[in-house]
Amino acid sequence: MPNSSSGNPNFQYSALLKKHLTFSDDRLEYDAQELLRVIKDSKDVIAAEPSLLEIQLPCIVVGDVHGQYLDLHRIFGMLGQGNKAGQVSRRYLFLGDYVDRGPNSLECILTLLLNKLAYPKMFNLLRGNHESMAINKVYGFYQELRDRFNEDDANILWKSFNDLFAYLPLAAIIHGRILCMHGGIGPTLNSLDDIRNIKRPLEEPNVNQLACDLLWADPMIDLKGFVPNTVRGVSVYFGEDAVISLCEKLKIDLIVRAHQMMLNGYGFYCKRKLLTIFSAPRYYPEKNNKGAVLRIDKNLKIGFHLLNPVTQTTRGESRFRNDFAQKDDDSSYMSRQGPTDSTSSAASNSSDPNNNNASGLPPVSPDSGLFLQKK
Ligand SMILES: [Mn+2]
């Protein structure tokens, strides 16, 4: 039984959560009936949350996970999911895209839901564009369920997971100052109440324009306003002027979103007003991209932890943990000169997370070439 002060005293799944604390790249064995109970219980908790979560400081923000269970373990190993007893000491905000693409969608979503049930205030889960039926039928999650269960159970589980996904909150505001979502902003977003007023469940997010933009939109360089997002086929691209005017209107400092692979795990846009964070290293094996997670301390200082891409020769728990002990990537970020392929491990020199410049933010980066597309 978890005994953190923020833990849920009625948590029923200690044994199941414990299975997820063991570092292993084997698939776990699941009982379909037990999973359905977890889904139902988490749906009750998540449905009671507002469409716009209010998050306190300090917190950790995690971008796309995409079924990369080992990398999720690396994040918890680095930052502390808790000790072996399952205690949690960090507040997390996940920006969606838990399923699809990677080999362990089920382990990833279960880890997050069980932690949500155990520590409802410490684990905050937003919806990504892959948390919807039309997408996760096609991009891996459905097939994974079919591979792991008989056809009836697979279909019931898939339907039930998506029923739950329809209730996931769509955005979060951290300390009233940092707005977070999976995709981006759109022309119908003019106040935080616009997000709060979105009614859930939203089985298909695209029926609500603002919800669609929150889940799908992308920034575009040298653009004014909004134009149709031709690469995604839904939602919009938004320009720097839209970011700046929304930050003024909402009286916020920064927008944090995920949704696009960053070679270095993260990238700024629009002079530090918009940050993309992507937490699935080696999502594109041919690009050998890093992953990153964002840390925001109690004074709103931000820093990054990087996940270097892992290959057959660099895998293993002890290597993973050693790899983490030293990461904060302000130095490699500062040395970036536009679009570079930072695959060299030398690019991730460590520096003290508390040694940022006075603003607490890394210097402005060249804003070009940081955004690559993947549907
Ligand atoms: Mn996405």
Image (tube, helix red, strand yellow):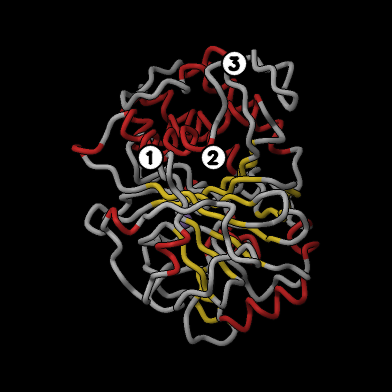
Q: Is residue 251 visible?
A: yes
Q: Looking at mark 1, is its residue's CB closer than 8 Å to ligand 1?
A: no
Label 3 crowd bin: few (<14), some (14–19), many (20+), radius 10 Å: some
Quadrant in the rendering for residue 47: top right
Residue 162: assigned label:
2
Percent across and percent down for residue 358 are 65, 66
Determine whether label 1 and label 3 are within 8 Å by CB: no
Mark earlier in primary sequence (3, 2) = 3
| Kind of residue at badge 1 | Gln
Q: How many marks?
A: 3
Residue indicated by mark 1: 68
Examine the image and state in which quarter residue 314 appears.
Answer: top left
Residue shown at 39% from the left, 47% from the top: 307
Q: Which mark is residue 13?
A: 3
Residues packed near mark 1 inside 10 Å, few (<14), some (14 to 19) or many (20 plus): many
Q: Residue at x 45, y 52 (%)?
A: 292
Amino acid at the residue labelled 2: Asn
| Image quarter hosting the N terminus | top right
- How far apart marks 1 and 3 lie (CA) works out to 22 Å
Residue at x 58% of width, y 20% of height: 86
